Amino acid sequence: MATRTRSSDPLLASVRGLRDEEARIQVAVLTSVLDWAAAHPASESDVVELLDDTEEPALHLAGPGAPMVGEYSALDLAHSLGMTTDAGLAYLGKALELRHRLPRLYNRVVRLEVPVWKAFRVAEQTKSLPMGGALFVDAKIAPFLHTCSWARVDRTVDAARAQFDPAEAERLRVAAAEHRHATVWLGAATTTGTVEVTATLDAADALDLEQALRDSAQTLADLGSTDTLNVRRSQGLGEMARGQQALDLGRGVTLYAHLDASDVALLDNTQTPVLVQQVKDWCTAAGTKVTVKPVIDRATNPSTDSYRPSEAIREHVVLRDRTCVFPYCRRRKVDLDHIVPFDAGGTTSADNLAMLCRRHHRAKTHST
């Protein structure tokens, strides 16, 4: 049987051609965004006090020496990119950083020698450096980025900060403990009832937690559990949480349960479907206090004569919109905005209110 070489296989050649075309398109988008930024400049004189919302703020999206852009103009760019406002601003910031502070790396990108995503990852790290530090990283990394490891990039950025901004390097060292966190990803809950948990701990706390998880997993095994070690460790973490809550008179649960089918419910607080049996298990756990809210009829239009919506109206709108209604935005910390302004005759009613995060609320009010 004949063996095709890599270069002679037409299907593989098609894959390579499409990959190369995608790379060219990504570079074309990058250069178009930079052309747009050059046509929409902002200057230091455009930086205004935050108290004056009638003026368009100028944003520093990249490091020192890179040009600034107007916030409201950048909203249109983000929308054109098909991104959330935050993602669009982040893209623009990395593009400006790459073009104006990492010139060697930018030239390699436009020559299709380094992919845009890889250069952006370097740009994200150099934004906090002085211009000298960014140029130092550019000189050290640009010739080798197609093959060097991210550990080398990290070390080079750290070396640049220590050399060109030693005060900031010391501040970051002292402030490192402030980056500790423990995050429960409720928004990513699945129908299986599982949730991802991530954390960054003080080393001593991490050692204590590891020992506690080992002990809990072993205790469950000694009691006859046949679950895997990982499952028993996760159960041990839950037992620790319930043990702490027992000191606070138990867990409180408030449910808005909209049944989509006989065995599936939608949890509005996490915006995710969940099996009804899982909800039952949560609600029947020892020490749990359950409050079940009545289902709100979204066909109604509650209203009030006052400017501020009542709690019933707010609850109605929040359950309907769930997040900021600006295109591609998913923020849940929001204002309730009158679609037709109140002082222009708009009513304070569910049909005339929508959820907007503070940034998009300001943009709607002051950018027109």
Image (cartoon, grey):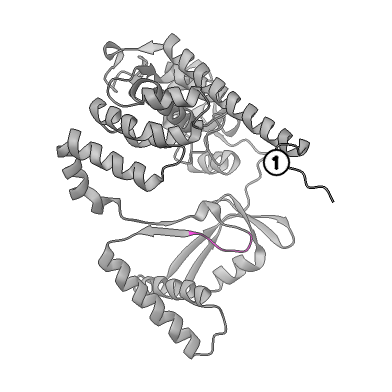
Question: Looking at this view, is 251 or 46 the one in front?
Answer: 46
Q: Residue at x 60, y 65 (%)?
A: 279
Left-right relation of 100 to 26: left
Give the residues in magenta: 191-196
Measured from the top left, where is residue 46 in percent x and y? 30, 13
Q: Residue furthest top?
A: 39
Residue at which label 1 appears: 6
> Secondary structure beneath disc 1?
loop
Dominant SS in magenta = loop
Measured from the top left, where is residue 141 in percent x and y? 36, 35
Question: Looking at this view, is 302 or 234 the one in front?
Answer: 234
Measured from the top left, where is residue 51 in percent x and y? 28, 22
Q: Is residue 40 magenta?
A: no
Q: Residue at x 36, y 77 (%)?
A: 212
Q: Residue at x 38, y 70 (%)?
A: 245
Question: Looking at this view, is 250 or 109 the one in front?
Answer: 109
**Rendered position, 132 above or below 282:** above
Left-right relation of 113 to 180: right
CA neighbours of label 1 inside 10 A, class few (<14), some (14 to 19), many (20+): few
